[in-house]
Amino acid sequence: MKYLHTALRGVLTDEELKLLPGGFERIGHVAIVSIPPEIVRMTDNIAGALLKLKNVRTVAMREGGISGRDRRPRLRVIAGNPQTETLHHENGCSFKLDVARVMFSTGNIYERERLPKLVGPKEVVVDLFAGVGQFSIPIAKHAEPDKVYAVEFNPIAYGYLRENVRINRVGHIVRPLLGDCAEVAPRGIADRVIMGLLHVTHQYLPLAIEVLKRNGGVIHYHESVPSKLRFERPVKRILEVAAGREVEILNKRVVKRYAPGVDHVVLDVRIGPGHA
Ligand SMILES: C[S@@+](CC[C@H](N)C(=O)[O-])C[C@H]1O[C@@H](n2cnc3c(N)ncnc32)[C@H](O)[C@@H]1O
């Protein structure tokens, strides 16, 4: 039985319990919950139940999805301490961030654990949409790359990225770069490129190929895609952009359900050498 259902049995009616979300997110000391409009009057009870959890000091409610080019979340604190800046510990890494100002998806945890295991010794990695270091930090901590270039254009996320590089003591490996990846990403340098963005990721595929070394490398390509086209559309887009190069799809997986009928998928793709 889900925590909220158990905690609120007898407080909410059976009908209201059915409308309760199955889960909630925990990022550092903040619990984040979505409350359907039909039970919004029960907000105080729901928040009170979450505040009873160990180490939860703030409860925030989602007010719509993550928006804008810089993927800013829409949250409102509904109980507890109004402080939304937190320190989140996961997989031997620490991430400082303000959950109300920058995006951090708890649903991507498996991907954050998986990627470092794929990175070979001495590789050069370019993380084109680095956020607060969600992929760059665990790769630097758990693999043995030569360098990780972490590109981020939102100054708030970039500030936390730099702070997380410092907190995790990976300054000798991770080089944060502030700016639009189309302008500041180094070219012809990478064994591996991470494209951890949704909605417009395909627009950056030509850039990702330019960032790879001339003899090619691996791209981790994320896309939000209608479930019906789950792997078909991303594969088609990759093949189109990489026309004339050898392409090997190494792996494809659903990261999470993004919205009803829409999946967040990731494909690991090896791109062969370019022409001289
Ligand atoms: C959805 S977040 C994902 C963070 C991380 N890659 C992950 O998957 O968990 C995408 C990040 O890319 C940044 N971003 C979006 N477009 C960008 C661009 N053209 N150049 C650099 N950063 C960009 C946003 O500001 C945001 O922090």
Image (tube, rainbow, N blue to C red):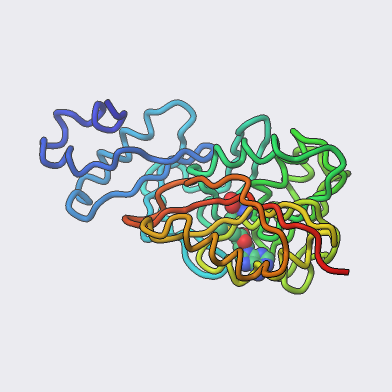
The residue located at (47%, 46%) in the rendering is 254
Pick the front one: 119 or 45:
119
Is residue 154 at all visible to an observer of this figure?
no
Instruction: Say above or below: 92 vs 126.
Output: above
Q: Position of residue 255 (x, y in %)?
A: 49, 46
Tell me if 7 is positioned left or right of 68 in this view.
Answer: left
Pick the front one: 104 or 84:
104
Q: Quadrant of the N terminus?
A: top left
Is residue 91 at all visible to an observer of this figure?
yes
Quarter of the rendered image showing ligand 1: bottom right
Q: Quadrant of the C terminus?
A: bottom right
Q: Position of residue 249 (x, y in %)?
A: 61, 51
Instruction: Say above or below: 195 vs 143.
Output: below
Q: Position of residue 10 (x, y in %)?
A: 14, 28
Q: Position of residue 108 (x, y in %)?
A: 53, 44
Pick the front one: 140 or 121:
121
Tell me if 38 is positioned left or right of 214 in this view.
Answer: left
The quadrant where residue 145 appears: top right
Instruction: Say above or below: 243 vs 160.
Output: below
The residue located at (55%, 39%) in the rendering is 109
Pick the front one: 198 or 85:
198
The quadrant where residue 11 appears: top left
Count the marks: how many? 0
The residue located at (71%, 64%) in the rendering is 208
